[in-house]
């Protein structure tokens, strides 16, 4: 059973029969209710006049009046201080998932697939940003090496440094591409080559998923290319119940690929689960694994 703020009372909070813990007046608490959050203040009678927040919200803030108690067993209400509240808000902001559409078409087949993933992520309570690479030209990496000193790409006339900054604020990633001659679009390859080379630290240990869209074939070869960005950056790879692809020559045809859409929803759910598990691990004191100094093998001698 999940505690809900509307008509919230000490009796209802004690639904488990466990011992109750009194909360002092004016204590700030976080209330988690799955995919929906409620916000409000308790009344003199010990009940809360709650109002529904945006669907997908993960936390809501209320202030408890004297006499209202929490159920110590359900863990739905947790007293926190101001410092902890700030930290929780920062962690909540880090739960954004960045989806990148590697197609020049703003609302084509790849977009349709990514939107299915995005909607499921939002249903799971995560914030999302769907970034359109669009039709503007993006240069390839020139291997100048300036990013090693600058910490960013030396070229500031396109989206690369903006994406690196956004990646640093994100908790996971979904890269989508159409299939061109059995490989990902040149556009997304140019972007990923540069953002991973110049800003790889922004991606490390964060989950990633690749999505490919094609009329018929070339999807597995394209997914293989995109997945290599994840594995070289120490990123967990998010899968579904089949390979991460949809088929169709138009958005309408993609929507008829019911299995493909189910695969996309699975990506969203699995991504949300993994992001939440990583966050729970951090709160339990489990940090990222140690990183060894890179060993570069020379195959010539």
Image: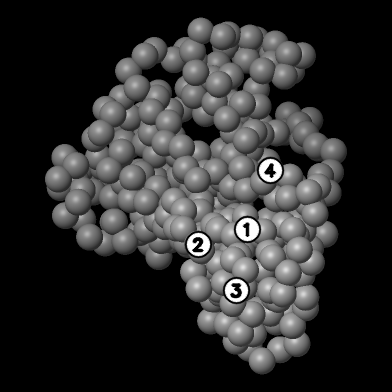
Q: Are marks 1 and 2 in contact (CB under 8 Å)?
A: yes
Q: Nearer the viewer, mark 3 or mark 1?
A: 3
Q: Nearer the viewer, mark 4 or mark 1?
A: 1
Q: Is residue 226 left or right of residue 263?
A: right
Cα distance between the residues tagged 3 and 1: 15 Å
| 112 vs 200, nearest the viewer | 112
Q: Are marks 3 and 1 in contact (CB under 8 Å)?
A: no
**Residue 40 point in image, percent of width and height:** 55, 58
Q: Which mark is residue 45?
A: 3
| 266 vs 59, nearest the viewer | 59
Cα distance between the residues tagged 1 and 2: 9 Å
With respect to residue 290, does 34 lie above or below?
A: below
Mark 3 or 4, nearer chain start: 3
Cα distance between the residues tagged 3 and 4: 34 Å
Mark 1 or 2, nearer chain start: 2
Q: Which image quarter is the C terminus in?
A: top right
**Residue 229 point in image, percent of width and height:** 56, 38
Residue identifier under label 1: 62
Q: Which mark is residue 90?
A: 4
Mark 4 or 1, nearer chain start: 1
- Give the class, few, some or many, for how many residues have Cα within 10 Å of label 2's Cα (few <14, many ≥20): some
Q: Is residue 69 left or right of residue 83?
A: left
Q: Secondary structure at mark 1?
A: strand
């Amino acid at each position: 059973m999940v505690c809900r703020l509307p008509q919230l009372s000490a009796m209802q909070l004690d639904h488990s029969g466990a011992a109750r813990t009194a909360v002092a007046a004016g204590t700030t608490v976080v209330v988690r209710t799955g995919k929906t959050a409620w916000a409000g203040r308790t009344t003199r009678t010990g009940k809360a006049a709650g109002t529904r927040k945006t669907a997908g919200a993960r936390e809501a803030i209320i202030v408890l009046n004297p006499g209202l108690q929490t159920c110590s067993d359900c863990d739905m209400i947790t007293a926190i201080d101001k410092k902890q509240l700030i930290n929780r808000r920062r962690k909540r902001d880090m739960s954004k998932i960045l989806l990148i559409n590697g197609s020049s078409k703003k609302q084509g087949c790849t977009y349709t697939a990514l939107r299915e993933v995005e909607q499921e992520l939002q249903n799971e309570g995560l914030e999302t940003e769907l970034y359109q690479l669009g039709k503007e030209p993006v240069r390839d990496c020139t291997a100048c090496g300036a990013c090693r000193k600058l910490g960013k790409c030396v070229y500031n006339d396109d989206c690369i440094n903006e994406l690196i900054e956004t990646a640093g604020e994100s908790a996971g990633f979904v890269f989508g591409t159409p299939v061109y001659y059995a490989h990902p679009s040149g556009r997304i390859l140019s972007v990923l080559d540069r953002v991973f080379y110049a800003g790889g630290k922004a991606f490390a240990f964060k989950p990633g998923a690749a999505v490919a869209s094609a009329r018929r074939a070339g999807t597995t070869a394209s997914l293989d290319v995109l997945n290599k960005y994840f594995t070289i950056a120490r990123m967990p790879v998010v899968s579904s119940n089949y390979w991460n692809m949809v088929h169709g020559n138009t958005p309408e045809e993609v929507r008829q690929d019911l299995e493909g859409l189910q695969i996309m929803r699975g990506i969203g759910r699995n991504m949300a689960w993994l992001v939440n598990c990583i966050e729970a691990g951090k709160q339990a004191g489990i940090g990222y694994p140690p990183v060894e100094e890179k060993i570069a093998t020379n195959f010539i001698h």
